[in-house]
Image (tube, rainbow, N blue to C red):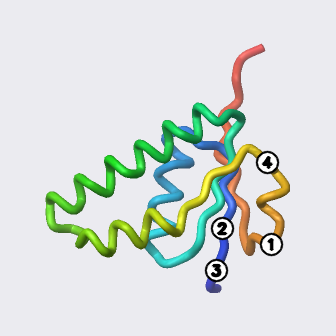
Amino acid sequence: MNFQKVGIVGSGIMGSGIAEVVATSGATVVLRSRSQESLEAVLDSLEKSLAKKVLKQQHSHANADAIRARVTATVSFDDLVGCDLIIETVSRTSP
């Protein structure tokens, strides 16, 4: 099965890692989080991860830029409409 657009609900360590792997595979990713601050942090983390891979020559600059361009972040569930697959990575918090 080939997914063109994947939604990920949750922008923690697992969600951001899945987003990078999915975008590296060529699919478009919509990453949904609860707050703008957490979205900015996860996009920053993605940039750092891709930069490390460029330094290690695992990706070219152009490839890293293309991967980053396939990831969008949102706080709205509405932006997940049209995804071929949605992955939920939200951990349960204690009451």
Indicate which disc, 1 or 4, sits on the residue closer to the N terminus: 4
Neighbour tally class for label 4: few under 14, some 14-19, many 20 plus, Cα within 10 Å = few
Label ID, residue 19: none
**Placement of 86 over or under 3, stated as above or below:** above
Give the distance between the C-alpha atoms of the residues marked 2 and 1, in whole angstroms: 9 Å
The amino acid beneath tag 4 is Ser
Residue flagged by tag 3: what amino acid is it? Gln
Q: State the image coordinates of residue 27 (x, y, percent, origin top left).
A: 56, 75
In front of the other: 7 or 78: 78
User: Residue at left 68%, top 33%?
Assistant: 35
Residue 37: which quarter of the image? top right
Question: Dots 1 and 3: beta carbons under 8 Å?
Answer: no
Q: If you read the primary sequence from the N terminus, does the residue marked by circle 1 or circle 3 appear first?
A: 3
* Image mark for residue 4: 3
| Residue 2 drawn above or below residue 52 | below
Report which residue position mark 2 lands on: 6
Quadrant of the image containing the C terminus: top right
Residue 8 x, y percent position in the rendering: 66, 55
Q: Which residue is mark 1?
A: 82
Helix, strand or loop for disc 3: loop
Q: Which residue is mark 4?
A: 76
Up the image or down, 81 lies above or below 18; here it is: below
Q: Residue at x 64, y 36 (%)?
A: 36
Q: Quadrant of the N terminus?
A: bottom right
Asked whether disc 1 touches disc 4, contact meaning CB atoms under 8 Å apart, the reply is no
Cα separation, mark 1 vs mark 3, equals 10 Å
